Amino acid sequence: MISDIPNKPEQSEQKIVNFFESYYVKPAEFPANEFNAVVGFFEKRDFGKVSAITVAQVIMQQAKLENIKVFKVLDTLKGLSKLAISKLVINILNSNRDNTSKLGQRSNKTVNKTEQRNIII
């Protein structure tokens, strides 16, 4: 992250904590051609470059965890509309995020004013 604020020197205790927090975490490795294909799939459906890369990483990680070929996942997504793919991507990203940073969707719900103002004592 780029910032104008100068970096604080990291304390030795924090260095130890950071080391052990990432000790058992393996970096995700994907074949470049598969990754580019997934990114291209989402870019063709009007996703921005950064969003397509982020979604591709999440989908490829999940496919790897479930031992499914990523192209099989893309084949199932081909028949969906752009809106359906966007909703699906929101659900996928939300399943991989903390509760404090969930993404939402706009819904046009009609609210019945009489139900809204009823108060139970």
Image (spheres, rainbow, N blue to C red):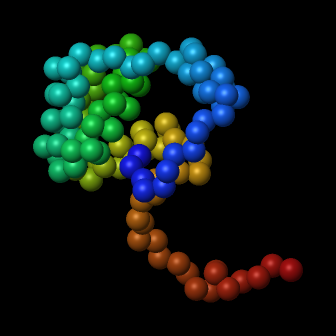
Q: Residue at x 29, y 33 (%)?
A: 56
Residue most extreme to the right: 121
Q: x%, y% of residue 21? A: 61, 24
Point 27% across, 44% down: residue: 50
Q: Tell me which corner region of the image, top left, top right, bottom left or bottom right, holds residue 64.
A: top left
Q: Is residue 53 left or right of residue 112?
A: left
Name the one closer to the observer, 56 or 22: 22
Residue 40: x %, y % from top left:
15, 35
**Viewer-side residue, 22 vs 45:** 22
On the image, which quarter does residue 13 sit in?
Answer: top right
In the rendered structure, the answer to whether residue 64 lies left or right of residue 75 reads: right
In front of the other: 8 or 113: 8
Residue 118, quarter of picture: bottom right
Residue 52 visible in the shown view: yes
Which residue is depicted at the point 33% across and 25% down? 60
Viewer-side residue, 8 vs 16 = 8
**Viewer can see residue 81:** no
The residue sitting at 60% across, 36% down in the picture is: 10
- Which quadrant of the figure contains the C terminus? bottom right
Q: In this rendering, is residue 104 above or below 44?
A: below
Q: Position of residue 78 (x, y in %)?
A: 19, 36
* Vertical side of 5 occupied by 67: above or below: above
Please state if 93 lies on the left or on the right of 68 as rendered: right
